[in-house]
Image (cartoon, rainbow, N blue to C red):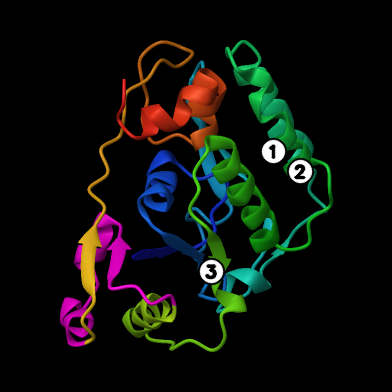
Amino acid sequence: MIVSAHQPQYLPWLGYFDKIDRADVFVLLDDVQFKKNEWQNRNKIKTAQGWQWLTVPVLYKYPQHIREVAINNTVKWQHKHRQAILTNYRKAPFYEFLDTVFQEAFSPSWSFISELNTVLVTGLVKLLGIETPLHLSSDLGTLPEDPDERLIALTKLFGARAYLSGNGGLEYMDLQKYRNHGIEVIFQGFEHPVYDQLFGQFVPNMSVIDLILNHGDRSLSILRGQK
């Protein structure tokens, strides 16, 4: 069994869902520190002028955990994001494919970024057809503060012998700690697929919605590198 984990992100990129797809269990790390100006409250879509950010405004106070970070609902971000997607993707072949996911994201009033991201990630996983179960780390009891010890504890909690890390883990993980616990660390090695997009030349690293709106129910096959 393989366990993997990552912070809940807003409309994540393809590599995030590849990581979920490769794991047997995936944990959303909602009780770790929020990282400002990263991916927990924003992501990118493609436009005729290149790419643009979709950013959810938040009220963050260091060192809050992700699940403690409130959304700033004095800003009409939901309307802005819905309009940006409509403007740039209304001619996409599968524009209506994400109606249910967008309805869930842009209709309710959300209090916390983690709640919004969890609903979005869960909905997108289901839509893609990925069967990996998702868990919130805050629901799994008290875990060690040390990042490596936390991931080791999560891996053991599910009775797994392997942890799947993104390639960036090579830079900060203490692999000897995992070996000491008999846990194999596997690195993702994600290769970004090239697929048909709107607006000319292919631009990688967009939100997964770019793939889904252009390719619908073929999206998971493309994500997996299948033709």
Could you tell me the amino acid type at mark 2? Glu
In the rendering, at what x and y percent does residue 94 appear? Answer: 60, 17
Please name the residue shown 57% across and 86% down the image: 141
Name the residue beneath numbered marker 3: 34
Name the residue beneath numbered marker 2: 104
Q: CA distance from mark 3 to mark 2?
A: 23 Å
Q: Is residue 168 on the magenta stretch?
A: yes
- Image position of 201 with respect to 30: above or below: above
At label 2, counting other C-alpha atoms closer than 10 Å, the crowd grade (few under 14, some 14-19, many 20 or more) is some
In the rendering, at what x and y percent does residue 121 appear? Answer: 58, 49
In the rendering, at what x and y percent does residue 9 appear? Answer: 54, 54
Give the structural element (helix, strand or loop) at label 1: helix
Name the residue beneath numbered marker 1: 101
Q: CA distance from mark 1 to mark 3?
A: 24 Å
Q: Residue 146: which quarter of the image?
A: bottom left
Give the structural element (helix, strand or loop) at label 3: loop
At label 1, counting other C-alpha atoms closer than 10 Å, the crowd grade (few under 14, some 14-19, many 20 or more) is some
Relative placement, left or right, of 92 versus 102 is left
Q: Residue 72: which quarter of the image?
A: bottom right
- Image position of 219 with respect to 60: above or below: above
**Decide: marks 1, 2 in contact (CB < 8 A)?**
yes
Residue bounds of the magenta highlight: 158-180
Please name the residue shown 43% across and 80% down the image: 157
Residue 47, disc: none
Q: CA distance from mark 1 to mark 2?
A: 5 Å
Could you tell me the amino acid type at mark 3? Phe
Relative placement, left or right, of 162 versus 84 is left
Is residue 201 visible in this depiction of the protein? Answer: yes
